[in-house]
Amino acid sequence: MKSRVPKVVQRLAGVPLVQHVLNTAAQLQARSAVVITGHGADQVEPLLLAPGQVLAVQCVRQEPQLGTGHAVQQAVPALADDGIVVILSGDVPLTQADTLQALIAQCGGTQLALLTIDFADPTGYGRIVRQGDAVQAIVEQKDASDAQRQIKEVYSGIMAVPVRLLKTWLARLDNQNAQGEYYLTDVVKFAVADGVPVVAHKITDALQVAGINSPVQLAELERAHQLRQAHRLMEQGVRLKDPARFDLRGQLVCAQDVEIDVNCVFEGQVSLGEGVQIGANCVIANCTIAAGAVIHPFTHIDGEKLGVTVGEGALIGPFARLRPGAQLGAEVHIGNFVEVKNATMAQGAKANHLAYLGDATVGERVNYGAGSITANYDGANKHRTVIEADVHIGSNCVLVAPVTIGAGGTVGGGSTITKSTQPGALSVARGKQVSIANWARPQKKPKA
């Protein structure tokens, strides 16, 4: 991968490759996952063992790395004899749970089941050798004869096998082959020799078995995956201006008649209500946007752990930023170069230009002027600003928290407000203007 980051930690759709595999395993109701690590284990294992993992994970080390069979041998002590093992690859992220369920069903606790696919160019893959319909062997590329290399059906690297049988076969592996490695695929010939049926579940979807071995392949799989996600959303009724210019790196739930323009990125958990319009080049993460809201181009919304909510019919952007804890009511307007953080804005409140609202409670119909800010941080602690209903804040004001602007009040432009104001009051706090008539600017001295 030409990277210091181990391959299985590289991200696809915002998620590490190995986490995609574990998420799929969790959908199978697996009792646990055993992850065999080797190269980069000191970076991979903390990710796998972090709190909040989707299922119980146990890591075992393969040192040195002597082949796929040797890798699975390391997991033997962690495998219960009454189970079925599904062997997956940490760099094959997009296998679907229903495909694996079908594979497990074919295994049935008594057979060796292989996931296979036909490739027009099977170079590099182990070939499926059959006698009639029965699978007889998997022959690796380097060990295949010229005739076997013409076979188009290949082994994906994924199998389902009863543990009690797998353990006996793993004990019989040797490294007498062109690569001097212990091949997991040799279990097929042991199964045949023992009279255990070997069955193949053949699929046609190459994306489900696509592995990643370079930055180019990672980018290609990213685009293929994103296009599939885009098509799934369009089949549900979402209007995408260009499905080739769409990125989903989390979960996106859309109501009817949602429109999304080009180059938008969705991360975390995002919910879009009926008729929501998302302009071009927006980044939206961890938020709920209610029906009829319009998010104009180049808006950045990220709720992180606190979340962001945007009310019905709100207008946001362009070039706006909503940070964690922004809770916007119906018909709120947030204009260009306005930032809102940990603040609530009631119905009809507006901050249309070049402003900052942090740690604030804003009432209904407030008009918040251009260039105004809430000074919420004193160098040690955050404090809250309360702006009650129907207040008008002039341009270039500083509201030094903690402070309350009383309902219906007005703050004159350019004011720095440090004390709470009464309802309905006009508050002006700025230096007295001084004008000196006929004043001459200093002149530069002529050069010698």
Image (cartoon, rainbow, N blue to C red):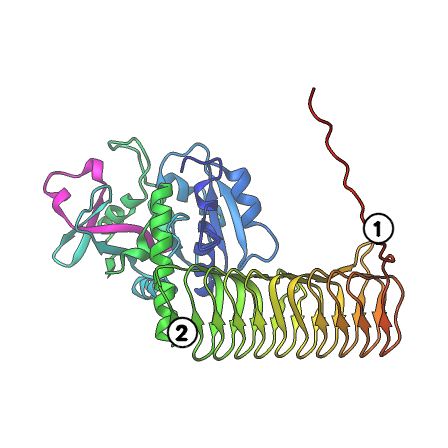
Q: Amino acid at mark 2?
A: Val
Q: Residues within 10 Å of mark 1 (few under 14, many from 20)?
A: few
Left or right relative to 5: residue 171: left
Left or right relative to 156: residue 294: right
Residue sitting at x 43%, y 42%: 7
Residue sitting at x 35%, y 74%: 235
Q: Amino acid at mark 1?
A: Ile
Rendered location of residue 313, percent (x, y): 56, 79
Judged from this view, the residue extending furthest toward the top is: 448
Could you say whether the residue bearing mark 1 is in a helix, strand or loop? loop
Query: Is 44 in front, or is 410?
Result: 410
Q: Is residue 80 visible?
A: no
Residue sitting at x 69%, y 23%: 447
Residue 436, which numbered label?
Answer: 1
Q: Is residue 105 visible?
A: yes
In the rendered image, which quarter contains the C terminus? top right
Magenta residue span: 136-163
Disc 2 or disc 1, which is closer to the eye?
1
Determine if the magenta segment contains residue 160: yes
Counting every numbered tag in the picture gives 2
* Above or below, comparing residue 43 to residue 318 in the picture: above
Q: Quadrant of residue 309?
A: bottom right
